[in-house]
Image (cartoon, helix red, strand yellow):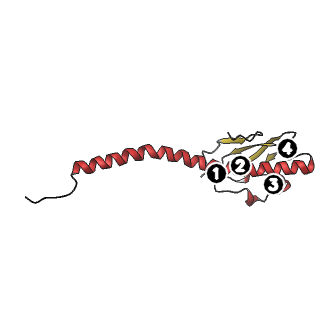
Amino acid sequence: MTGRKGFTLIELMVVILIVGILAAATIPLMRGRIESAKWAEANATAGTIKSAVRVYFVEHGTAPTGSLGNETTRTALGFKDEDLTGTYFVPGDYNIDSVDENGNAQITVTASQENAPPAGESKTLKVDGTWK
């Protein structure tokens, strides 16, 4: 009798089963992180818009509101179209809802692109800086 070395079919099937279970548990976790990363782009751009609104408010005593898809609003704040165009969001996705008496803006971002988070889903950068 020769000493054969190797794995049995049962051992290989057990390893494949374990890998399958780990993949099934990991994919939903990773998908949530992907969505979170996409919204991070929107949060960063909304923060930039909020800073521009604050500067405009300090210089003019008032600030524009409305969609950043509007060229007049973008130009007033010193943005070009490509400044607000990212991988997942475009200028028209950002809306300045309101500006308080200190120049702090509330900005709502609504996903519209095919590769963005679910179309129509919105998050808001509130006056106090929270992102929900």
The mark lying in front, picked from 3 and 1, is 3
Q: Residue at x 46, y 46 (%)?
A: 27
Residue 93 numbered mark, or none: 2
Q: Give the labeled residue for mark 3.
A: 74
- The residue that label 4 is drawn on is 103
**Residue sitting at the far left:** 1
Residue 127's spot in the image, x, y percent? 78, 40
User: How many angstroms separate mark 2 from mark 4 (CA)?
Assistant: 21 Å
Q: Is residue 1 visible?
A: yes
**Labels 1 & 2 near each other (Cβ < 8 A):** yes
Q: First in sequence: mark 2 or mark 3?
A: 3
Which of the 4 quarters of the picture holds residue 130? top right
In front of the other: 7 or 23:
7
Q: Nearer the viewer, mark 2 or mark 4?
A: 4
Q: Secondary structure at mark 4?
A: loop
At horizontal 52% and vertical 47% (from top left) the residue drawn is 31
The residue carrying pointer 3 sits among few (fewer than 14), some (14 to 19) or many (20 or more) residues within 10 Å by Cα, namely many
Is the C-beta separation of discs 3 and 1 under 8 Å? no
Q: Earlier in the sequence, mark 3 or mark 4?
A: 3
Identify the secondary structure beneath mark 1. loop
> Label 1: which residue?
113
Q: Secondary structure at mark 2?
A: helix
Q: Position of residue 46 (x, y in %)?
A: 73, 49
- Three-letter amino acid code of the residue under disc 2: Asp
Q: CA distance from mark 1 to mark 2?
A: 9 Å
